[in-house]
Image (cartoon, grey):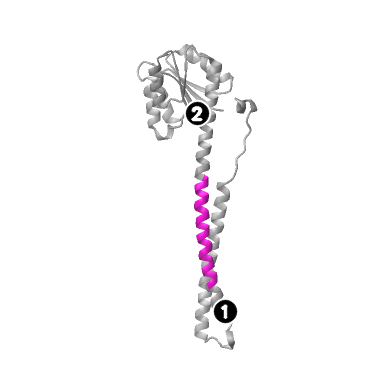
Amino acid sequence: MSTLYLVDDETDLLFILSEFLTRVGYDCESFSSAQSAWERVNETPPDAILCDMQMPGMTGMELLKKIRDDERLKTLPFIFFTASTQTDKILEALALGADDYITKPLDFDALLVRIKTRLSYRNTIEQRVRQLSLDEHMETTSRQMRLAFHDMMGVIGNIYSVSSLLNAPQGVPVPPADRERFLEMVQRQSQLSINMLRRVISMVGEQAEQSSVELSYVLFQEVLD
């Protein structure tokens, strides 16, 4: 369930709006001032904010600017409702980072469509960002694995070479001192290859965890909207 913060100094409108949005499935919190809404946003950001543009004290425009200046809240959907039909005010709000607006008296059906659209758009953006982060992580892991396999091939090659010498080619025996040294080298190189293999296995496990897919159910009508 998405959480909406409703901000307006008209308490009657807040009540009506909260009742309507709660009935259609949203969790709503109401604020009669932009300052109180800002304090709450700092504690627990909502999924979207619906805010009046003109209010005493901190205005809706000032609240929007504070939110967009916060790195954590740059993609938080922000919808204005306003009695103003002045194009310059609306353009100023959009330039500050407002996602949408609707004029008073409110058309609740139109408002509902705007809310669903903005929430859906934000989810799409966040999924894309997560996918880009995942792709970058997987590319880095793949590059590290290629380097690890390359190093392992070198170590295994050393073990093979030493083993060949220990087999005394052309029937030439290996002196005991050299044999002991070769065996120590094989043991050391074997331990190194085991550590490298453990590293590769760990990277494969991390990559599998990162690429796990989460499934969820959605209402077809919401997708269609």
Q: In percent of the image, x 56 and y 58: which residue is there?
A: 201
Q: Is residue 186 above or below residue 77?
A: below
Q: Secondary structure at mark 1?
A: helix
- Residue occupying image coordinates x 57% and y 53%: 205
Crowding at mark 1 (Cα within 10 Å: few <14, some 14-19, many 20+) = few
Identify residue type, mark 1.
Answer: Ser
Image position of 66 (left or right of 118) = left
210 in the magenta segment: no
Residues drawn in magenta:
134-157
Cα separation, mark 2 vs mark 1, equals 67 Å
Residue 31 lies in what quarter of the image?
Answer: top left
From this viewpoint, which residue is outermost toward the front?
87
Callout 2: 10 Å neighbours few (<14), some, many (20+)? some
Q: Which residue is mark 1?
A: 164
Residue 25 versus residue 85 in the image, above or below = below
Q: Is residue 156 magenta?
A: yes
Q: Position of residue 91 (x, y in %)?
A: 40, 21
Asked if the residues shown at circle 2 and circle 1 are in contact, with their CB atoms under 8 angstroms apart, the answer is no
| Image quadrant in which the N terminus is located | top right
| Residue on which disc 2 sits | 47
Q: Is residue 9 above or below residue 160?
A: above
Q: Residue at x 57, y 48 (%)?
A: 209
Quarter location, residue 82: top left
Residue at 54 percent across and 56 percent down: it is 202
Q: Amino acid at mark 2?
A: Asp
Q: In the rendered structure, which disc, 2 or 1, sits on the residue that comes first in sequence?
A: 2
Name the secondary structure under disc 2: loop
